[in-house]
Image: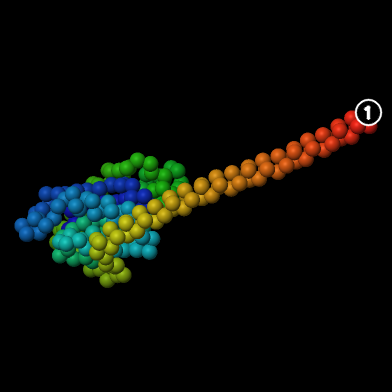
Amino acid sequence: MADIVILCRSSDALPLVEIWNEGNLNLAMNTQQRKKVDLQTIKMNSRMICKNLSSKETKCSVLEGEMSYHYIVEEGVCYMCIAPSEQPKKILFLFLAQICQAFTEEVMKQFSSTHVTFASAIASVKKPYHFISFDRRIYKIKNEFKNPDSVKSLNMINSSLSEVTNIMKKNIDEILSRGENLEDIGRMADGLKQQTQKFRFASKKMNRDYMIRKYTSVGVAICVLVLLVYLVLHKVRT
């Protein structure tokens, strides 16, 4: 069972609650796997995935060497678990579905007095790890899945396993590439913004120069007209 679970807001990757059982993760892997896995790399990859979620991918497995990052996205929340790639994927997605259901209940319970929807409640969260106390519920669900003798968990798994379908598969390089593409788009947007500002400045300058030329011409014409009138009147008097 996954020993790393991350819940974050899908719009901006704000962490809502996490559990990191590093010791158990090492025990779940053999010596050869452990040499290939670096915890900092796992953390970096998980953050990258959370920051580059696609609205079209609500259920996905991202493969990276000996580790897999499985996640589902529901109503503005990404539920992710990280486990050795050899672990059964369908069981892990069923595990995430149970966490999703329990978390929805927890959020609605906390925001019951405000009468808001689940999505608006998540959107209103300002600080990271707002639901840190939910980690106890995650551990409880994890223990239910780890105990094969549990009648409840066995019945739940057998009845729900067939429902876990349409899981997209990706490689971590695709996620990293998407991140680079997003950065390119950001740079293009900044460039367009700068060009727009330059265009506006140039337009204002052109309008200002035009008005100066226009009123200068009118001023010169008025001065010439006044001078002519003065000369005519002076000539008549003399």
Q: Nearer the viewer, residue 178 or 30?
A: 178
**Residue situated furthest right in the rendering:** 237
Identify which residue is drawn at 26% across, 65% down: 170
**Residue situated furthest front in the rendering:** 238
Along the horizontal axis of the image, is 80 left or right of 219? left
Quarter of the image with the C terminus is top right
Q: Is residue 59 above or below residue 215?
A: below
> Where's residue 133, x and y in %?
27, 43
Quarter of the image with the N terminus is bottom left
Identify which residue is drawn at 11% across, 57% down: 36
Identify which residue is drawn at 24% across, 64% down: 171
Q: Nearer the viewer, residue 127 or 42?
A: 42
Q: Nearer the viewer, residue 158 or 25?
A: 25
> Where's residue 181, x and y in %?
35, 58
> Where's residue 155, x and y in %?
22, 65
**Residue situated furthest left in the rendering:** 31
Dot 1: within a 10 Å radius of its alpha carbon, few (fewer than 14), some, or many (20 or more) residues?
A: few
Secondary structure found at label 1: loop
Q: Is residue 94 above or below residue 196?
A: below
Name the kind of residue labelled 1 in the image. Thr
- Mark yes or no: residue 160 visible: no
Residue identified by numbered label 1: 238
Q: Quadrant of residue 129?
A: top left
Identify which residue is drawn at 78% across, 35% down: 223
Q: Quadrant of residue 236?
A: top right
**Residue situated furthest top in the rendering:** 238
